[in-house]
Image: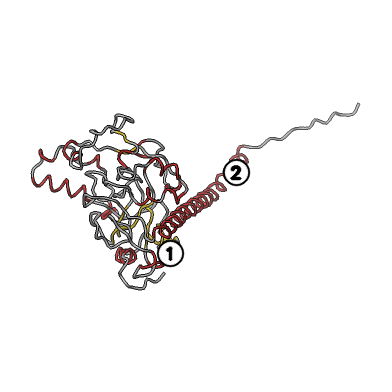
Amino acid sequence: MPAVRQSRVRGFTLVEVLVVVLVIMVLVALLLPAVQAAREAARRTQCANNLGQIGIALRVYSETHSVLPPGSVAVTIPVTQQAPPEGPGWIALIMPQLGYPAVWAAINSEQPLRSFVRWPNQGITEVNADLWSGADEPASTGEVMIPEHVSVPILRCPSQWRFGTTGKEAGASSYAGSHHSSERPIMDDSDGLLYVNSSESLEAIPDGAAQTILAGEWTSGNAGFGYLYGDRGTLRNGLVNNAARSGLGNQQLSELDNRPLEELTEEERERKLQQFRVVGGFSSNHSMQINFLMADGSVRPLATAMASSVLSRMIRRDDVRDIEF
């Protein structure tokens, strides 16, 4: 009787399994940074496209009105965190050109504060005639009315994950106009293109549109009153994102002393008012660069390590210097 041959099924040894797992881990470690870099490159491109769309909207507005929109419409100067401006800011004014006519239709252009109003920690409320008594009220009571914004995706850099879709966070913008070449309160005599009650022409920029910065990115938090207004949330100055310098510009109102001004000493009062006036500069969540919109409509990435003196010259509309790229 012939012998029956028995076949043995050979499995993987522990060493072989570990080798396969190790190879997979090495491949993942090599590919993951490349995937992340590709995703960030896509987000950076989308961010540049957003700025490009804003540039087109500003150009259309300029062709319609012969001037750029004012950076901020205000009676009380300088514009501070103490109270919102009395009128709309430059982003609100170009809502129709951005493709959001419904948002523009809902804005009270004479009193944006009364468009969508929310008292802090009290939800949405009806707007009454006696709800807002004047610009001095927030400083004396510590209560500041915040408009309830509609979320506008084009105002958000995809690399910035901190945005909310309701309340004050819905009004935050990743993009701000250039109002002055150095740190100073938002005034009506700044040297940028967008400032209080400004009416600059794209066709009459002394330095030339291609050499002058119109807007740029910044890593917005809860600063300012939202895109309805021209304040430190939508206007920035010639600083780059340096913690030692623009950290003051990123200071939040909630971090300030909430006591009424009349309860403070003269020194404390001046310090508080100075903190209200701080604006801050441009910054970015992209690695080593910030996207800027030039007045000719082009979008250019500039290094975060660039000297503030260079950025200041590019923001000044009348610097009359050639900037090499």
Looking at the picture, how far across and down is residue 257, in whole percent?
Answer: 18, 40
Q: Quadrant of residue 180?
A: bottom left
Q: In front of the other: label 2 or label 1?
A: 1
C-alpha span from label 2 to label 1? 57 Å
Q: Dot 1, how many residues are within 10 Å of its Cα: few (below 14), some (14-19), or many (20+)?
A: some
Q: Nearer the viewer, residue 257 or 120?
A: 120
Q: The C terminus is located in which quarter?
A: bottom left
Name which residue type carries label 2: Val
**Residue at 41% across, 39% down:** 150
Q: Nearer the viewer, residue 323 or 16?
A: 323
Left or right of residue 256, residue 33 in this image: right
* Residue linked to disc 2: 19
**Residue at 38% across, 51% down:** 175
* SS state under label 2: helix
* Residue linked to disc 1: 296
Q: Dot 2, how many residues are within 10 Å of its Cα: few (below 14), some (14-19), or many (20+)?
A: few
